[in-house]
Image (cartoon, helix red, strand yellow):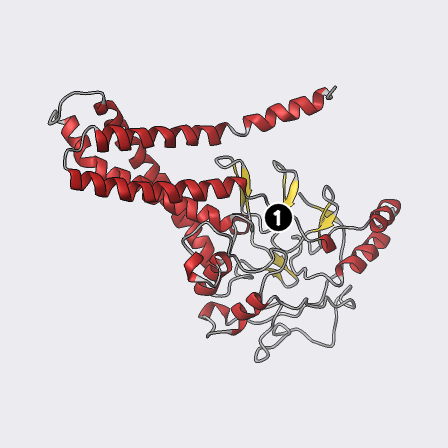
Amino acid sequence: MAPSGSRSFDCWRVLYWIPVLFISLIVAWSYYAYVVQLCIETIENMGEKTVYLLIYHLLFLMFVWSYWQTIYTKPMNPLKEFHLSHVDKELLEREDRRESQQEILRRIAKDLPIYTRTMSGAIRYCDRCLLLKPDRCHHCSACDMCILKMDHHCPWVNNCVGFANYKFFMLFLAYSLLYCLFVTATDMQYFIQFWTNGLPDTQAKFHIMFLFFAASTFSVSLAFLFAYHCWLVCKNRSTLEAFRAPAFQHGTDKNGFSLGAYKNFRQVFGDEKKYWLLPIFSSLGDGCSFPTCLVNPDPEQPSIPPGRNPSVKSAGESHPFPPKPLRESQSRLLNNGQTDGSEDRDKRGTSNPALTIEKET
């Protein structure tokens, strides 16, 4: 017999699907209202009807495909090397002194490509998943797991939007916006005719009028949301990073992962243009490490911030943090083409500062 706590949790999980069910019902009704009531029952011109139906079904297919991919693409877990081994877990649990815990974390982190820190300068450690968080990774309380390059948890897809499905989410916004704009534009003249009694008062009147109101309202909200996420893509930021800039050794840097608009776009959509408009995964990298000036410093730029004495090391900098070799796709992002003006910044070193355990969810 299942425990009552488990049944309660399952009930809450079912409730999370209500927003998805609501969207699905709205889309199903819009299909009936547009195809049956508008195109088949109302529009008399066969050429106009055929063109509308072809374009509508193409947008409808891409919209549903990208929405489905956003919902059912499971978030990617951090690679196993970021997880604490059984021995390390026991050592960390047995140690009460902070200094000893710091030494354990230093030993685990020294070979990992981790460059972001907490606001206090500590290594980002998740006490629920028992792992050192990769750059841009955050723990989602709704999913109860760490999400690679987490953007936000979206109730409308009942899923976390992150590295695994951010491209699908962007295409979902784009195709849903095009879908609503097309419905609004093609439905407008018949909406006006029904409103001014230019057409007979039939069952289609309610569907066509309400379809125009619904499509135009969704168009406005989707336009703002899509424009905001386009801005995030161009800046190579997540929603979480837009509200709180990632912290590096030298401090917070809102442009720490920005490589220029075009390279930032390629990180999400990939190198192959034929896949850009399709809900097929083509993002670059593994979700655990990202190209930045910290990973591949420009040899023509100083590796130490101006005004800092390279011979003096702060406490804890005796343990350098070796950079991990970049994936081929990441190296291309950093090396090919000319850098944008936003990239001409002082390059910092990659030393690992003193680490303290700071539990962050």
Q: Is residue 128 above or below residue 267?
A: above
Residue 107 falls left or right of residue 52? right
The residue lying at 70 percent from left, 76 percent from top is 310
Asked if residue 102 is positioned above or below residue 153 in the image, the reply reads below
Residue at (27% x, 43% y) in the render: 54
Q: Quadrant of residue 298?
A: bottom right
- Residue at image point 65% right, 38% down: 144
Q: Mark 1 points at which residue?
A: 76
* For residue 256, side relative to residue 209 (left or right): right
Above-or-below relation of 196 to 45: above
Q: Considering depth in this image, is 69 or 126 the residue closer to the camera?
A: 69
The secondary element bearing badge 1 is classed as loop
The residue under the point 75% across, 70% down is 313
State which quarter of the image contains the C terminus.
top right
Q: How crowded is mark 1: few (under 14 residues within 10 Å), some or many (20 or more)?
A: some
- Choose between 180 and 274: the one closer to the eye: 274
Percent x, y of residue 53: 26, 39
Pick the front one: 171 or 99: 171
In the image, residue 232 lies at what x, y percent? Answer: 46, 53
Q: Quadrant of residue 1?
A: top right
- The answer to whether any part of residue 142 appears in the image is yes
Whether residue 224 is visible, yes or no, is no
Question: For this rendering, which residue is in front, 37 or 134?
Answer: 37
Percent of width and height locating residue 352? 72, 64
Give the amino acid at mark 1: Met
Identify the residue at the far bottom of this view: 300
- Residue 120 image point, x, y percent: 68, 53
- The residue positioned farthest toward the left in the image shown: 198
